[in-house]
Amino acid sequence: MNKLSDEKEKKKYQEDKEKLEKLSSRNEELTTLITKLYEDHALGKIPVKILLIGYLIYMIRSNKT
């Protein structure tokens, strides 16, 4: 029974590790996108509305994870 429990823990650990890696990668992508939006706004390439919409989408998606 102990061996079965260890196997379940290892499987759960691996699943959690993979999920964390995916979420970390996604967080990096979103951070890059929001940074790009901010830079584009600072350079006058996009209006503040687009910046705010992008930021709101970023915040909504960040809170869902």
Image (cartoon, helix red, strand yellow):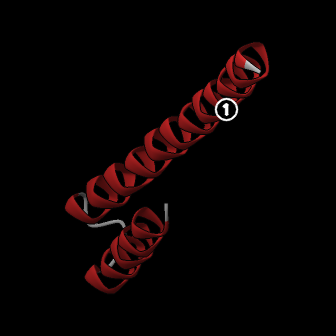
Total labels: the figure holds: 1
Give the percent coordinates (x, y) of residue 46: 36, 72
Above or below residue 10? Residue 47 is below
Quadrant assignment for the N terminus? top right
Residue at 28% in and 53% down: 39
Label 1: state its secondary structure: helix
Residue furthest out toward the front: 1
Give the percent coordinates (x, y) of residue 37: 36, 60
Res. 10 image quadrant: top right
Above or below residue 24? Residue 7 is above
Q: Which amino acid does label 1 sit on?
A: Lys
Res. 38 image quadrant: bottom left
Front residue of 54 and 4: 4
53 displayed left or right of 6: left
38 displayed left or right of 29: left
Residue at 41% in and 67% down: 58
Q: On the image, numbered disc 1 is attached to which residue?
A: 12
Residue furthest out toward the top: 3
Front residue of 44 and 36: 36
Residue at 27% in and 65% down: 41
Front residue of 15 and 9: 9
Bin the neighbour count of mark 1 within 10 Å (Cα to Cα): few under 14, some 14-19, many 20 and up.
few
Residue furthest out toward the left: 42
Above or below residue 53? Residue 55 is above
33 displayed left or right of 23: left
Residue at 67% in and 32% down: 12
Front residue of 26 and 34: 26
Give the percent coordinates (x, y) of residue 3: 76, 13
Give the percent coordinates (x, y) of residue 62: 41, 62
